[in-house]
Amino acid sequence: MHLSYVASLLTLSSLASAIPTAPQPRALPLVQSNLLRRVLLRSNLLAKSQTLEGFAYATPERNRVFGGPGHNATVNYLYDQVAALGGYYNVELQPFVELYTSGSASVKVAGADQGASLFTYSPSGNFSEPLVAVANFGCEAADYPDLAGKIALISRGSCQFGLKSALAGAAGADAAIIYNNIDEELAGTLGAPPRPEGAYVPTAGISLAAGTALKDSLAGGATVTADIDVVSVMENRTTYNVIAQTSGGDPNNVLVLTAHTDSVEAGPGINDNGSGTVGILEVAIQLAKYSVNNAIRFVWVSAEEFGLLGSEFYVASLSDAEKAKIRLNLNFDMIASPNYKYGIYDGDGSAFNVSGAPGSAEAEKLFQDYFTNDAGLKYVPDSFDGRSDYAPFQDAGIPAGGLFTGAEGIKTEEEQALFGGKAGVAYDVNYHAEGDNVGNLNMDAFIQNAKAIAHAVATYGRSFASLPPRAVPRAMKRVEKEKDLTRGGRFDKYHLTE
């Protein structure tokens, strides 16, 4: 072999080794709580909240009610945000159709306005007729006398509002007025018809004070004529859940995070529940920088404000085998209330005597330990009574947990000492109101809860070892609660019962 030839080979070999090779995809580092929390920024939470507010204010209705233009824009935004993350998530839209209802209600007695609110799914009607007080809570047919040509006056309590309205109609009443049993205004939902007990009658809600005064007048022997005017519009609307699951991680061991995306009619719903929507979105975006051992599924559910419709539809769409893959559901609804508390769902039932499926207590403890040891913050238990979008998971026997900063409830002096703010004032004075916009957010609570969400995602994304062994989900009986228009992100924001 000639030396020149050998030299040529050596030269070619040297050149080949000097040519840079194409970069190989780098494996993502396994998620860690402190690293995931560190990349969450107030500015990003605020900017995304402003985007949702913009969707609402770009419409004549200035809200994000399910199936409306503001909410449709929200759905598209969420889909686009997670779909743009380079295939980190498998993303889908889940369509479903639900009955939308809107309208107004008025009740007057001797010309005096009683401050009535509409029960959703109430039919329209206008009557001027004598009131008749119904016995007990109006939950049994025997509580109702013959009400032909009358308006039923019924106390809130013990059973669904829809049952009260249907039983009133079955007794011959032309309309029903339900008064509260606590010192708050009352509005709610009758639940989508039909009911086996019969058709609804026009139904309005009034306060405890107004109802008690009317009942006392009737008890004293007076004839009380009420003028009730209910105007209701109902239409079927198509809406969407947004579902995004990590491409990596064990698909047979899944953490599901939920937050509802719709508002009430009154306003843009930026705390209720733009805060939960944005909170889990920002965690989802930042999580894409890391790998996970267990699959993480983010589910933004629609039509919560009309009775948990999106989460009910989602859970009902899952086979038993798919439900068994879900190790835990964490729900986030109203996590930036202006006069906030740090509430953790009472998964073990120690505070409110209502516990979740096995694993719920451990989820509560994870958040308790985080707030105490990592964030250095106080917390209080919050009633784990199935009144938010974790309820359908709970009903299916899937463990659940989550965080909540308060709605129309009143902050106590003890909570003021723990969290600041003002005792004797609602946690969110703009709850279900026009003022629930970006200015309504408490950014301190927002970022702290977002970091708590990130901690849970990182912890369970690495391991479910802290949870009890997987059990076959068994259906659980939900604690029947109302949904009223005065409670956000909770199953009583449109009272169904009691």
Image (cartoon, rainbow, N blue to C red):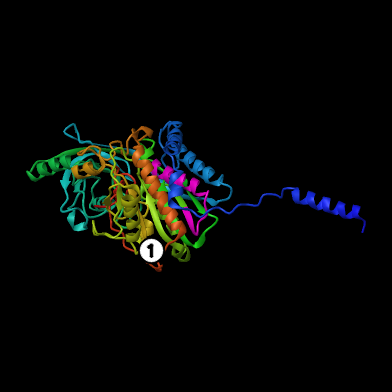
Task: Check disc 1: other Cα within 10 Å, few if <14, some if 14-19, many if 20+.
Answer: some
Residue at disc 1, secondary structure = loop
Number of marks drawn: 1
State the image quarter where residue 464 is shown. bottom left
Query: Residue 159: x percent and y percent?
Result: 24, 55
Query: Residue 46: x percent and y percent?
Result: 42, 36
Q: Could you say which is closer to the camera, residue 4 or residue 309?
A: 4
Q: Could you say which is closer to the camera, residue 157 or residue 446?
A: 446
Q: Quadrant of the N terminus?
A: bottom right
Can residue 356 be seen?
Answer: yes
Asked if the stretch drawn in magenta spans residue 283, the answer is yes
Query: Residue 451: x percent and y percent?
Result: 40, 46
Magenta range is: 274-297
Q: Residue lying furthest right in this view?
A: 2
Relative horizontal placement of residue 134, taking residue 71 as reference (left or right): left
Asked if the stretch drawn in magenta spans residue 263, the answer is no
Q: Could you say which is closer to the camera, residue 39 or residue 330?
A: 39
Q: Residue lying furthest left in this view?
A: 220
Work out whether 42 lies above or below 322. Answer: above
Q: Could you say which is closer to the camera, residue 106 or residue 449?
A: 449
State the image quarter where residue 209 is shown. top left
Query: Residue 288: x percent and y percent?
Result: 52, 49
Where does label 1 land, which residue? 467
Relative horizontal placement of residue 144, taking residue 3 as reference (left or right): left
State the image quarter where residue 395 is shown. bottom left
Can residue 264 be seen?
Answer: no
**Residue type indicated by callout 1:** Leu
Work out whether 348 lies above or below 263. Answer: below
